[in-house]
Structure formats: C-alpha cells, structure tokens
C-alpha cells in the first residue's frame, strides 16, 4: 500500500512540474508578445512624432528669429507628448563636409574626428568612389568601407552630399533647390519605456511659398 502511495505521489509531482514548465513557457510567450506589441506601438508613434518634428522645424526656419535660435545658438527644438520627447537640432548644410566636393585634407580631418580606422585608405576609397559616381546619399559612404556604428553616426552628423551652392554643379541639376535653403535635421525620439529612434534628414525649404509643401526631403537616414 505504501509503495502504491509513493508511486501516486511521484506521478503528482511530475504532473505539477510539467504544469509549471508549461505555465512558465506560456508566461514567457505572453510577455514576448506584449513587448513586440509595445515596440510596434512605439515605432508607429515615433514615426508620427518625428514627422511632426520635421514639419515644426521647417515652420520655425521660416522665422528669422527662430532660425537664429536653431542655428547660431544651437538651441534644439523640443516636442513633448505623453511619455515621449523629440529633440531636433538643425545645421546649415553649408557648415557640413560635402563628401562630393571636400578636399582630401578635409576628408582626412573628418575621418580623424569620427575615429575611422585606416583613415587614409578610407579617404582614398571615398575619392575613388565619388569620381566614378557622385554620392547621392550620405548612407552610401558606408558601402566603400565598413564603419563602426559610432563612426557611421558621426559621419552622418558631420557630412552631406550637397554643399548648398546657389549654382549647383552638373551632377546636382536634378536636385535643383529652386532658390531654397538646405538644412540637416537630427531628430532624437526618446520614450519613457526606453524606446529610442534617431532620424537624420536633409531638407530643402522652398523659397516660393506657392509651391504647396514648404520643403522637400533630399536625404533620409534612420538609427535605432
């Protein structure tokens, strides 16, 4: 009789252990699904907020006073909503390194500033690549040589493929500015739950207010 009770007890313990394992897997699965749903929600909300950041930045740039605050005073534009904060810094493209026009010495300084390994080799590859076909996007620079995330983000912050000249050279005719100014916007979106997104865009503002949309995007890069 005692042997029978022992066998039943073992079966019960095995059953409880199996149920515990199944419950743990179910809990983990539910938690993963919740995290994925939260991430998708944050990503969708972030896309909306970043777009609002672009729109509001362009609106601020149409005011001389606000434009001065954003450029000369390096005062970021802040957009806050429940549980989220978007900060936008604005740079004139004229202040950035033009990957299509810069001298080798300037590219070497950029490589040093951004801690790019084998800087001289990177400069040579960049010049050779642009001689074959001018860069159409800053992100194309990553294709000539592998860059660390830190270096890639640094180059994106400091470089452009458009110098903002009033009379663009031949390879830029298709992107003629129509007399507008060109700016690089760096947008950082931070949520209280830890979600972060960075967006870097180059925009040209239309000098002619009758053109409908007050800006056009020339370059777009996303970082998580």
Image (cartoon, rainbow, N blue to C red):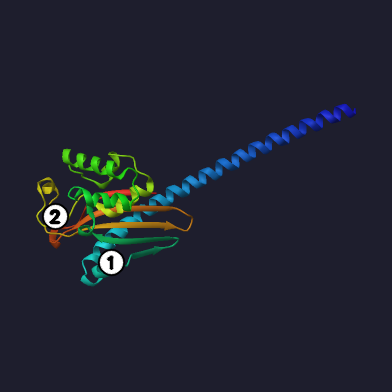
In terms of secondary structure, where does tag 2 sit? loop
Q: Position of residue 60 (x, y in %)?
A: 25, 66
Say if 215 sits above or below 144 in the image.
Answer: below
Q: Can residue 160 be seen in this snapshot?
A: no
Which residue is nearer to you in this view: 46 or 137?
137
Mark 1: few/some/many CA within 10 Å (<14, 14-19, 20+): many
Q: Residue furthest right?
A: 1
Q: Position of residue 171 (x, y in %)?
A: 12, 45
Q: Can residue 156 be seen in this snapshot?
A: yes
Q: CA distance from mark 1 to mark 2?
A: 21 Å
**Count of numbered labels shown in the rendering:** 2
x 28%, y 61%: residue:
90
For this view, does 16 lie left or right of residue 90?
right
Q: Position of residue 162 (x, y in %)?
A: 19, 52
In terms of secondary structure, where does tag 1 sit? helix
Q: Quadrant of residue 96?
A: bottom left
Residue at image mark 1: 70
Which residue is nearer to you in this view: 93 or 110?
110
x 72%, y 33%: residue:
15
Say if 145 sits above or below 66 in the image.
Answer: above
Q: Position of residue 118 (x, y in %)?
A: 32, 42
Residue at image mark 2: 177
Say if 217 sits above or below 13 in the image.
Answer: below
């Amino acid at each position: 009789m005692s042997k029978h009770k022992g066998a039943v007890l073992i079966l019960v313990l095995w059953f409880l252990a199996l149920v515990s394992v199944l419950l743990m897997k179910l809990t983990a699965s539910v938690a993963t699904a919740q995290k994925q749903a939260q991430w998708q929600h944050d990503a969708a909300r972030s896309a909306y907020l970043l777009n609002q950041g672009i729109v509001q930045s362009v609106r601020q740039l149409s005011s001389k006073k606000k434009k001065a605050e954003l450029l000369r005073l390096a005062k970021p534009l802040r957009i806050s909503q429940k549980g989220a904060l978007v900060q936008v810094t604005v740079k004139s493209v004229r202040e950035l390194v033009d990957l299509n026009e810069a001298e080798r010495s300037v590219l070497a300084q950029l490589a040093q500033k951004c801690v790019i390994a084998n800087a001289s080799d990177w400069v040579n590859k960049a010049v050779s690549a642009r001689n074959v076909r001018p860069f159409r996007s800053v992100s194309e620079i990553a294709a000539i040589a592998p860059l660390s995330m830190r270096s890639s983000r640094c180059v994106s912050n400091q470089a452009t493929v458009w110098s903002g000249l009033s009379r663009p050279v031949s390879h830029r005719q298709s992107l003629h500015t129509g007399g507008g100014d060109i700016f690089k916007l760096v947008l950082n979106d931070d949520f209280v739950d830890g979600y972060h997104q960075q967006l870097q865009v180059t925009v040209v503002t239309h000098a002619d207010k009758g053109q409908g949309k007050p800006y056009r995007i020339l370059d777009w890069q996303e970082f998580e």
